[in-house]
């Protein structure tokens, strides 16, 4: 089965399998249409031949690394948007550092039955995580990370 996302009559923005469209949207409008996202404004820092792209977030100034395909890269030192689904954000209370681990503070906790939406502030970068646990409370310090394959420009 293939799905299409268009923008008005006769315009297809992206074509592919449903999972591909959901996990690898090529445009912000496609990502928004297919569900909630953390849309992160960033600048690409890495060379086009690098297997791992380096991006600096415009809010918070965080360095984010993720696997890239040269054909998908935005121009060097130009603004772009990274999309990370809330269910791909992982929150821990241990404060561990490392690649793609950001310190954050819980700003809001929205219980919704089987899942809870946690709104986070990572030094000015607002993110949401969708979790099964409710162990996080407003004001808690935590660390967040994400699955490296979950990000796309």
Image (cartoon, helix red, strand yellow):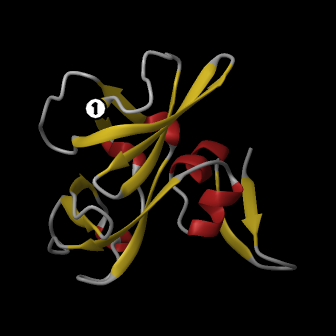
Q: Is residue 126 left or right of residue 61?
A: right
Q: Nearer the viewer, residue 57 or 53?
A: 57
Q: What residue appears at the point 83 percent right and 79 percent down from the top-left corner?
A: 10
Write down the residue under mark 1: 141
**Neighbour class for label 1 at 10 Å: few (<14), some, many (≥20)?**
some
Picture layout, residue 119 above or below residue 76: above
Q: Nearer the viewer, residue 73 or 112?
A: 112
Q: Quadrant of the C terminus?
A: bottom left
Across and down, in percent, residue 1 comes to 74, 44
Please say whether residue 62 is visible from this viewpoint: yes
Picture layout, residue 66 above or below residue 135: below
Across and down, in percent, residue 60 comes to 27, 61
Please say whether residue 15 is visible from this viewpoint: no
Q: What residue appears at the point 41 percent right and 42 percent down from the top-left corner?
A: 120
**Element on which disc 1 rests:** strand
Q: Nearer the viewer, residue 134 or 5?
A: 134
Q: What residue appears at the point 83 percent right and 78 percent down from the top-left corner?
A: 8
């Amino acid at each position: 089965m293939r799905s299409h996302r268009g923008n008005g009559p006769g315009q297809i923005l992206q074509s592919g399998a449903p999972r591909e469209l959901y996990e690898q949207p090529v445009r912000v409008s496609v990502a928004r249409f297919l569900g909630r996202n953390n849309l992160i404004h960033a600048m690409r820092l890495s060379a086009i031949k690098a297997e791992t792209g380096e991006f600096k977030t415009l809010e918070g100034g965080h360095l984010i690394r993720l696997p890239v395909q040269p054909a998908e890269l935005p121009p060097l030192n130009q603004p772009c948007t990274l999309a990370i689904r809330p269910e791909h954000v992982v929150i821990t209370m241990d404060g561990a550092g490392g690649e793609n681990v950001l310190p954050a503070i819980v700003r809001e906790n929205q219980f919704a039955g089987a899942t809870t939406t946690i709104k986070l502030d990572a030094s000015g970068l607002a993110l949401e995580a969708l979790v099964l646990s409710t162990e996080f409370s407003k004001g808690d310090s935590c660390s967040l990370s994400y699955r490296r394959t979950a990000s796309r420009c």
